């Protein structure tokens, strides 16, 4: 696989504080220096932070000139609201969207769920119906299974429905076992699914946060990693050095064995992703 074909992307979330907004231009510039193929900006399902996605996107594009894809969720929403957002994004020049079902925030009233479109496959179909091929659509994939799925086969069928509905590619939930990703890709190949499936990469920088996220999203932290993180939880430098080695080794295994790119969950921190980038010896454009 040639270097040009490999696609790197960086995920951001809308800042939650005035200080976070102040730091956004520097964050975007620092990450843009290595020229990712695109940025993506998460979207709070069920009402939280939703305007923030648009505002973040506009600022990142203005700051960097790099394509930026909004995440768009359907849970708790209506066709009319989603349609209005799609029009807004299209008018702003957006051509790529990460289409998701989303999770309702814990604070949402049960009356808000589930919305007119129940699954991401229905959202993909709706976008295709209303906007044809205007948008490149990415969807989520779960090599270790989505936590609410009945079983791995049912989850795989749900994934296939998103591709059949018109998704162009997928980004995975993060994982630390390369074999889970390659097994998923092999299942896709056997099922005739040929779209790029880009691994989602979570840099390891904080033991408590990683444990919380992983419990919520169903990502497995292998025992040997968990034990080392527990040991280093009060030694930030040791934890981050260990995390860098583990995640860099994972990225190398993924790229060496044919992954079509990497999507970094930056958590709005440039340094962990850029450290990984340097450690992996990924291309750094001249002058950055
Ligand atoms: P779906 O593909 O619809 O699947 C959801 C569940 O329903 C799965 O268990 C699936 O097996 C099941 N299912 C699907 N179709 C059917 C069917 N027809 N019948 C029965 N069961 C079915 N969340 C946010 O709120 N905002 C974000 O910005 C965001 N960004 C993300 C980015 C990435 C790369 C990833 C991997 C996840 C992201 N998430 C985000 C989290 C995501 O919204 C949750 O994981 C959510 O629970 C599922 O979304 P989905 O699009 O995978 O849903």
Image: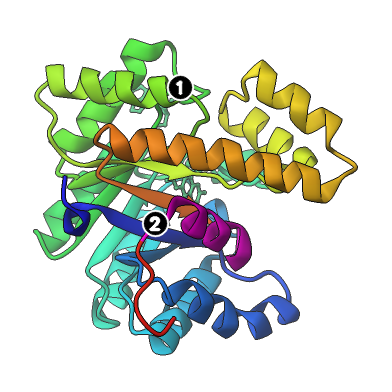
Identified at 29% across, 42% down, the residue is 170
Q: How is the image coloured?
A: rainbow
At which x and y percent is residue 86? 29, 67
Identified at 34% across, 57% down, the residue is 8
Secondary structure beneath dot 1 equals: loop
- Residue annotated with mark 2: 72
Q: Earlier in the sequence, mark 2 or mark 1?
A: 2
Residue 56 visible in image: yes
Residue 244 or residue 127, whichever sits in front: 244
Residue 2 or residue 90, whichever sits in front: 2
Q: Quadrant of the N terminus?
A: top left
Figure label count: 2
Q: Does the closest atom of ligand 1 sit within 8 Å of the Cβ of label 2?
A: yes
Identified at 19% across, 45% down, the residue is 167
Residue 42 visible in image: no
Identified at 35% across, 20% down, the residue is 155
Q: Quadrant of residue 145?
A: top left
At which x and y percent is residue 265? 52, 52
In the rendered structure, does residue 281 fall within the stretch colored magenta? yes
Q: Residue furthest bottom?
A: 62
Residue 58 or residue 27, whichever sits in front: 27
Residue 22 higher or lower than 151, as above or below: below
- Residue annotated with mark 1: 144
Q: Quadrant of ligand 1?
A: top left
Neighbourhood count class around disc 1 (C-alpha, 10 Å): few under 14, some 14–19, many 20 upward: many
Is residue 46 toward the left or the right of residue 69 in the image?
Answer: right
Residue 8 higher or lower than 168, as above or below: below
> What is the magenta range?
266-282
At which x and y percent is residue 139? 31, 44
């Amino acid at each position: 696989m040639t270097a040009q074909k490999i696609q790197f992307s960086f995920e951001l979330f809308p800042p939650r504080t005035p200080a976070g907004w102040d730091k956004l231009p520097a964050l975007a510039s620092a990450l843009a220096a290595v020229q990712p193929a695109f940025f993506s900006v998460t979207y709070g399902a069920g009402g939280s932070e939703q305007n923030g996605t648009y505002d973040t996107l506009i600022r990142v594009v203005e700051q960097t000139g790099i394509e930026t894809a909004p995440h768009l969720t359907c849970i708790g929403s209506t066709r009319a609201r989603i349609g209005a957002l799609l029009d807004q994004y299209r008018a702003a020049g957006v051509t790529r969207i990460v289409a998701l079902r989303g999770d309702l925030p814990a604070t949402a009233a049960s009356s808000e769920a589930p919305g007119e479109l129940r699954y991401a496959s229905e959202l993909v179909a709706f976008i295709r119906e209303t906007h044809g091929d205007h948008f490149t659509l990415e969807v989520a994939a779960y090599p270790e299974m989505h936590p609410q799925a009945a079983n791995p086969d049912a989850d795989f069928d749900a994934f296939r429905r998103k591709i059949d509905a018109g998704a162009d590619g997928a980004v995975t939930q993060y994982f630390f076992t390369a074999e889970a990703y390659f097994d998923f890709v092999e299942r896709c190949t056997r099922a005739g699914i040929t779209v790029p499936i880009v691994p989602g990469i979570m840099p390891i920088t904080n033991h408590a946060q990683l444990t919380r996220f992983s419990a919520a999203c169903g990502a497995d932290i292998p025992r040997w990693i968990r034990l080392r993180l527990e040991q280093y939880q009060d030694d930030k430098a040791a934890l981050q050095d260990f995390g860098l080695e583990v995640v860099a080794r994972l990225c190398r295994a993924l790229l060496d064995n044919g992954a079509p790119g990497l999507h970094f969950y930056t958590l709005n921190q440039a340094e962990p992703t850029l450290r990984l980038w340097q450690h992996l010896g990924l291309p750094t454009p001249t002058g950055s």
